[in-house]
Image: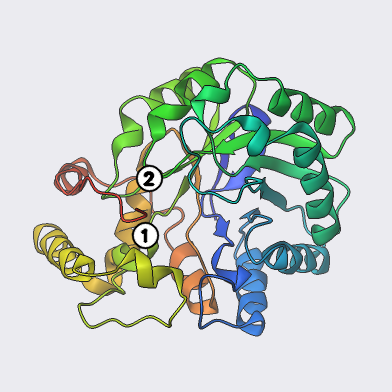
Amino acid sequence: MHYRRLGKTNFEVSEIGFGAWGIGGNQWLGGSDRNSLAALHRAIESGVNFFDTAFAYGEGHSERLVGRTVRESGRQIYIATKVPPKNRIWPARAGTGIEDVFPYEYIVETTEMSLRNLEVETIDLQQLHVWNPEWIGRDEWRRAFEHLRTSGKVRAIGVSINDHQPESAIELIETGLIDTVQVIYNIFDQTPEKTLFPSALQHDVGVIARVPLDEGSLGGRIYENTVFEKGDFREGYFKGGRKKEVVEHIDALMADTGVERDQLAGLALRFCLTHRAVSTVIPGMRSVGSVDANCSVSGLGPLPDQMRAIVRKHAWGRNFYQ
């Protein structure tokens, strides 16, 4: 496993991190705690030392699984979690005041709950789970984070940027008040490269690349006849004719690159890691097999220029979260 500096936190984190949304169990169905725990342990054995969870992932269930695994490992692991919006609306909506989403007391209280779920004294990275640039001048989030830092309950702070809205965090980065940003970045959505990544590099803000496999499509797991369990998040994400669209784009990507379906995930992860602004990429991993496959990408180095040029042509502007 290779490691990278997470911006000004100076944390040396594994370039393959563990995205723990799927193990929460409330939106990604078909898994089990037994398999999730096995995957978590295998990730640590493979050198993964950065785990990204959130209170909203199973109302603390993902946090409890991550915390248990970290305690049992006895190793130096960096845990990142997130404060969910109080109004439980993703993404943050324009015109909604911060008092309805992240009031001071709520940020502090939710962080306390995450500490109890994780059973740790300090959270390495606490993040707001949504962001609205209209809140930039408000002091609720600033005071809450300052309190959590000075009290020793949080080491670093960051924001998980709204789906497909990387530009919304530029002004926030420029304040110098945050240490990291988490953003959707993959072969289909390359927009963070335009302005977010240059700003992050300039201000030494760590970048956590999420959804590198586009919720499974860039892992080669989506077909036109794929059926998800009722209530599974992906049932809505790939609704209607979206699976057909995905298959067409994946087929074109494989044809142009010469990459087989079982090699797509590796290509997608290497694409993300090729950009020097990216500190870590956090694919979801719910099985030992997916951990082994994803971790094998570490150390392969950046994509060759010719391959990267081909892949860049497959940017696809759309928002399946809507």
Q: Which residue is mark 2?
A: 185
| 287, above or below 9, in the image | below
Give me the residue at 30% from left, 27% from top: 194
Using the image as rendered, state which of residue 130 and residue 53 is in the foreground.
Answer: 130
**Of the residues shown, which amino acid type is indicated by label 1?**
Leu
Q: How is the image coloured?
A: rainbow
Q: Is residue 209 visible?
A: yes
| 176, above or below 228, in the image | above
Quadrant, the N terminus = bottom right
Secondary structure, mark 2, is: loop
- Answer left or right for 307 relative to 238: left
Percent position of residue 79, x then y: 70, 51
In which quadrant of the rendered view does residue 141 lie? Answer: top right
Query: Label 1 to label 2, Cα distance in Å?
Result: 9 Å
Percent position of residue 294, x then y: 45, 64
Using the image as rendered, state which of residue 95 and residue 152 is in the foreground.
Answer: 95
Give me the residue at 56% from left, 62% from top: 21
Secondary structure, mark 1, is: loop
| 67, above or below 275, in the image | below
- Answer left or right for 98 relative to 317: right
| 122, above or below 19, in the image | above
Percent position of residue 320, x then y: 31, 56
- Answer left or right for 64 relative to 90: right
Asked whether disc 1 touches disc 2, contact meaning CB atoms under 8 Å apart, the reply is no
Using the image as rendered, state which of residue 173 and residue 265 is in the foreground.
Answer: 173
Q: Is residue 10 visible?
A: no
**Of the residues shown, which amino acid type is indicated by label 2?**
Tyr
- Answer left or right for 263 relative to 155: left
Give me the residue at 34% from left, 45% from top: 302
Q: Which residue is mark 1?
A: 213
